[in-house]
Amino acid sequence: MFTGIVEELGRLTRRTDGQDSSRVEISGPTVVPGLSHGDSVAVDGVCLTVTEVVGDGFVADVMAETLARTTLGRLTEGDPVNLERAVRVDDRLGGHIVQGHVDGTARVISRTPGDRWEVVRFSLPPELARYVVHKGSVCLDGVSLTVSALDEDAFEVSLIPTTLELTTLGRRQPGDEVNVEVDVLAKYVERLVAAGAGGTTGSTGTTS
C-alpha cells in the first residue's frame, strides 16, 4: 500500500522486452537504500515487485497486461518516473490510500499557469467517472491529488511548485497519458450499496 506522496524522480535505465513481459531497471538512489527482493515500489503509480537491487537502482518484471493497460508499456530508456516505497505502518498518511493498481489512463487536455501553481485538465474515462468527485482524491502517475474541478468528461487538479518540480506531472504536455487510480473507498462503497440493493456491479479491471 502507498500514500501517493512521491519520494523521488527516478529514471528508467534499462528495459529488456520479452515475448509477453518486460524487465526494467530503474535508478533511484533515494528509495533504493533498504530495498530488498520482494519489496514493493510504485513506479508512476504502478505497484512493481523488486526482483534485484543493483547499485543505486532496482530491477522489476512487468507483465503483458500491465504494459498494455498503463503508461509503463510506452516508457523508453532515460524516461523519468515517479517512485514511492510501500508505506510502513508507523508512517504518516500524507496523501490517501493508494494500492498501486491502475484503473485506467487519462490524457492531459490543457495546462493553465497560475502565480506559483498550474491547473491541469485531464480527460475523464467514462468507466471511471462515477468514482471521481469534486474535492475527492485521485492518484495520477502515483501522485495523490485533490480534484479541484469536475465535468462529465474531464477533471482538473491544481499542482503546487513542489509537485511541478519533483514529479513527472510537471513535464506532462497536452496529449500525454497518465496512469489513473481512483479512490478505492469509492469502489467499496459502490459495491456495498449495490449488495444492499440486491444488485451487483462490474469491475473496472484494475491491474498491478
Image (cartoon, helix red, strand yellow):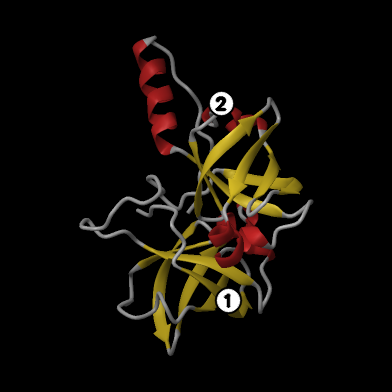
Crowding at label 2, few (<14), some or many (≥20) Cα neighbours within 10 Å? some
Q: Which residue is rendered at x = 69% and y = 49% of the image? A: 114
User: Which one is nearer the viewer's eye here, 92 or 67?
Assistant: 92
Q: Is residue 12 above or below residue 1?
A: below
Q: Amino acid at mark 2?
A: Arg
Q: Distance of mark 2 from mark 1, alpha carbons?
A: 34 Å
Q: Earlier in the sequence, mark 2 or mark 1?
A: 1
> What residue appears at the point 35 percent right and 53 percent down from the top-left corner?
1
Q: Looking at the picture, how far across and down is residue 31, in whole percent?
A: 40, 74
Taking 126 as reference, is 46 above or below it? below
- Label 1 sits on a secondary structure element that is strand
The picture quadrant where one finds residue 15 is: bottom right
- Residue 170 in which image quadrant: bottom right
Please give left or right for residue 10 compared with residue 36 in the image: right
Compared to 132, does 8 lie above or below? below
Q: Which mark is residue 21?
A: none
* Residue where numbered disc 2 is placed: 130
Instruction: Please say whether residue 42 is visible from this viewpoint.
Output: yes
Across and down, in percent, residue 75 comes to: 66, 68
> Quick one: SS at disc 2?
helix
5 is higher (above) or lower (below) than 106 = below
Residue lying at the far bottom in this picture: please name it: 55
Query: Which residue is located at x 59 percent, y 65 percent?
Result: 165
Q: Give the labeled residue for mark 1.
A: 11
| Residue 21 visible in this rendered orientation of the protein | no
Find residue 10 and report its horizontal and vertical position in percent. Answer: 53, 74
Amino acid residing under circle 1: Arg
> Quadrant of residue 9 in the image?
bottom right
